[in-house]
Amino acid sequence: MPTKDELAERISTKVIGEYSKLKAVCRPVTRPTGIGEWTILAGVAAINRDASADNIKVLSIATGVKALPDSELQRSRGKLLHDCHAEILALRGANTVFLNHIKDWDLKNVDDLIESNNEIPPKFKLKEKWELALYISKLPCGDASMDFLNDNCKSDDDFLEIDDDDIFQYVNPNVKTILRGRLNFGKKSVVRTKPGRYDSNITLSKSCSDKLLMRQSSSILNSLNSALFAQPVFLRYIVIPNLDKKTRHALEQSFHSRLPFCSHQFEFLNCHTPFYDDKNDENSVPSLMCSTKLFINDSTIEEAILNGMKNGFYTKSSKPLRKNCESHLSRFAQWELFTQIRPEYKDTSYLQFKAQQTERNQLIISIKAALSPDGWIPTKTDDVK
Ligand SMILES: [Zn+2]
């Protein structure tokens, strides 16, 4: 039986190993000016809990540090990825992987990842032997990493000092429990939007700390998989390089005390091997390119993603989107998979379907109310039909 440290090391080695095999376009480059780029890597891995931790199956990996401004979502119709931070993409990727496994479900050809019950139509669950880990090459943005900004991003222009009574820190001054990016960075246990430049259009996507915390309580399944699975799927571990006493304490404070009554608290594991395309140089800049690779049975899907869509499909925001611009991780692509599995929803829109998930919606409303008692600020409505 490997120790937790050995397990973490094996998970990180696997995820970084898959990253190294990505096409060059999916990875940071040195720009013509000589300036290097950096990115964040994340991956979801299934670990066989029966002792042999050599049996680690990577489900999805992703890189990225970008999120779309809310104003860009106008033309999306489910096709644009709002949030391209690596850990969020990796979790979206795992959901696309689950949808593909269910679509290809065949009782005769036994699936190694999931199994079904006897209901008609069948409901699924992750096989008992698997438990899930999320590897992230850096502390998640938002609440859990606010103490470490000096080390991480002192050159970013959004790292501003601000007083407690300055309304500039709020997206909406009536909602004082949601702050913009890293403003008023000393404030703890508040929801934050994704960090970004304050002179550009705002993104309303919430920080990775907030989103991961919500998934700690509500499961990592999206609304589509929640309807297909008989029970929720939780992450057991989050693996991060170079955790020390201070960073581990900050993570535990943020993830174990902001929400009450969570029976599936993440266990944080430390790995030693750093991610080689992290920010190693003061002058390097974040990569604009994001990427994802999905591992579905014996096949893989690899995509470079720019501005929330597949690389090479970009059009100016005043123009309509191009055909087939959507990533396999997009709401559009996931809804297409779902309606192949459940054709009875073909005439329903994604948001109409989501509105019917009453139990899940109640849970998410209660989590949001606990995290931001002043109210929630949603991103722009983005439906698919
Ligand atoms: Zn993030």
Image: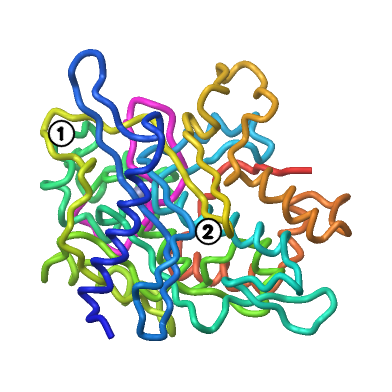
Decide if residue 301 is on the left or right side of residue 131. Answer: right
Question: Which kind of residue does numbered mark 2 sit on?
Answer: Ala
Q: Which residue is mark 2?
A: 94
Rendering coords of residue 29 (x, y %):
28, 27
Q: Residues within 10 Å of mark 1 (few under 14, many from 20)?
A: some
Q: Which residues fall within the magenta stretch?
A: 185-208
Apparent side of residue 22 relative to residue 355 in the rendered image (left or right): left
Is-magenta flag for residue 193? yes
Closer to the camera in the image, 9 or 344: 9
Q: Is residue 232 magenta?
A: no
Q: Is mark 1 within 8 Å of ligand 1?
A: no
Dot 2 lies on which element? Answer: helix
Please report the residue visible at 25 percent of the width from the left and 53 percent of the height from the top. 138
Q: Nearer the viewer, residue 360 or 227?
A: 227
Distance Cα–Cα, label 1 vs label 2: 33 Å
Q: Quadrant of the N terminus?
A: bottom left
Residue 170 x/y as whole percent: 37, 45
In-front residue for pair 133/346: 133
The residue lying at 41 percent from left, 66 percent from top is: 213
Callouts 1 and 2 close, C-beta under 8 Å: no
Q: Count residues near mark 2 (Cα–Cα under 10 Å), then give few for <14, some for 14-19, many for 20+.
A: many
Q: Amino acid at mark 1?
A: Ser
Vertical order, 319 against 45 (above or below): above
The quadrant of the picture occupied by the C terminus is top right
Q: Quadrant of residue 277?
A: top left
- Residue, disc 1: 155
Q: What residue appears at the point 50 percent right and 59 percent down from the top-left corner?
A: 375
| Residue 343 shown left or right of residue 300 in the figure | right
